[in-house]
Image: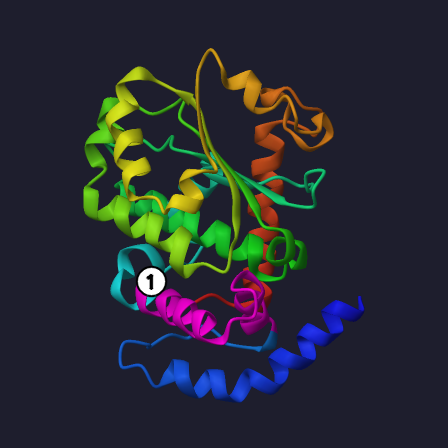
């Protein structure tokens, strides 16, 4: 608690200077509110290195300005966005793991004949933004990301361009105020090998060391050391079903955004 109070006091002192530096950049045109906790999350993941923090915040804001197809017009009441959110393509688990880390479950399962990959990434980015917006533990202890590829098809892979993959990995590694502790790909089919090879090539050395790829046969190994009480039943856990988790997540997202607003 004392550490958190010290951090808050420090970020408050730095707040004005940070805002001037961030808004001075010509590409930063956003309605996102940069408050003390916003800055504190970036300070934490950058281990209070001021230059790294400024660079990461700028990256975060600039990417939002340069990729409107992911970040603009994210009203969750839009029918297409509602449909994607209801699929549960990006779900924060309701409980932290035994190291206090938030666990995020990503599932590439949109219909590629109806939705573009940009549509899916817009819904996923909205769900992620809401999940981490006020989550202290996530900024302190980091994330475990589980990407479930059991629904991926060749049509999905056909939607993935190198530029899109680079932007996505740039968001994870250099933009979002997150510290990725583990990146697990589960239920990985053989035909996704090229996709995984490209992903591994683009990742930083640090994240590459934290990357684990599991086939359909070896996927149970991924969950062996995770508490059963944080996992959905579909993954060998006891904390409800994916459908229940998706319903709760969508409900919380819509309540939060109706109270706080979202950039249109």
Magenta stretch: helix, strand or loop mostly:
helix
Q: Quadrant of residue 211?
A: top left
Residue 224 seen by the camera? yes
Q: Residue furthest right?
A: 1
> Which quarter of the figure has residue 48?
bottom right
Residue 58 is one of the magenta-drawn residues: yes
Q: Give the range drawn in magenta.
A: 37-63
Location of residue 236 in the rendering, given as x and y in whole percent from the top left corner:
64, 19
Residue 199 image point, x, y percent = 31, 37
Quick one: quadrant of the N terminus?
bottom right
In this rendering, does residue 79 appear at all?
no
Which colour assignment does the render follow? Answer: rainbow
Can you tell which quarter of the image residue 249 is in? top right
Kindly state the secondary structure of the residue where label 1 is placed: loop
Residue lying at 57% horizontally and 30% vertically, measured from the top left: 243
Q: Residue at x 23, y 23 (%)?
A: 154
Q: Does the magenta stretch include residue 189?
A: no
| Residue picked out by circle 1 | 72
At 59% from the left and 21% from the top, the residue drawn is 234
Q: Which of 199 and 76 is in front in this view?
A: 199
**Most foreground residue, 140 or 29:** 140
Q: In the visual, does 72 lie left or right of 95?
A: left
On screen, residue 253 versus residue 151, left or right, reads right
The crowd level at tag 1 (other Cα within 10 Å; few <14, some 14-19, many 20+) is some
Quadrant occupied by the C terminus: bottom left
At 60% across and 66% down in the image, what residue appears? 259
**31 is higher (above) or lower (below) than 109:** below
């Amino acid at each position: 608690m004392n550490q958190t109070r010290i951090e808050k006091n420090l970020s408050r002192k730095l707040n004005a200077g940070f805002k001037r530096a961030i808004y001075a950049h010509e590409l930063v045109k956003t309605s996102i509110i940069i408050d003390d906790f916003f800055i504190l999350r970036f300070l934490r993941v950058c281990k209070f290195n001021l230059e790294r923090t400024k660079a990461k915040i700028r990256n975060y804001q600039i990417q939002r300005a340069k990729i409107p197809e992911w970040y603009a017009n994210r009203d969750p009441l839009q029918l297409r966005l509602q449909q994607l959110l209801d699929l549960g393509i990006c779900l924060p688990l309701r409980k932290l793991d035994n190291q206090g880390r938030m666990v995020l479950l990503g599932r590439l399962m949109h219909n590629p004949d109806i939705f573009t990959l940009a549509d899916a990434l817009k819904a996923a980015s909205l769900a992620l933004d809401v999940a981490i917006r006020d989550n202290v533990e996530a900024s302190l202890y980091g994330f475990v990301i589980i990407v479930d590829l059991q629904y991926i098809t060749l049509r999905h892979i056909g939607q993935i361009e190198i530029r899109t993959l680079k932007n996505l990995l740039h968001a994870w590694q250099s933009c979002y105020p997150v510290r990725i502790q583990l990146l697990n790909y589960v239920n990985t089919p053989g035909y996704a090998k090229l996709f995984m090879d490209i992903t591994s090539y683009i990742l930083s050395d640090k994240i590459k060391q934290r990357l684990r790829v599991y086939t359909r046969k070896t996927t149970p190994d991924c969950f062996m050391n995770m508490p059963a009480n944080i996992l959905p039943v579909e993954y060998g856990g006891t904390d409800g079903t994916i459908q229940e988790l998706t319903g709760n997540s969508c409900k919380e997202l819509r309540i939060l955004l109706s109270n706080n607003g979202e950039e249109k």
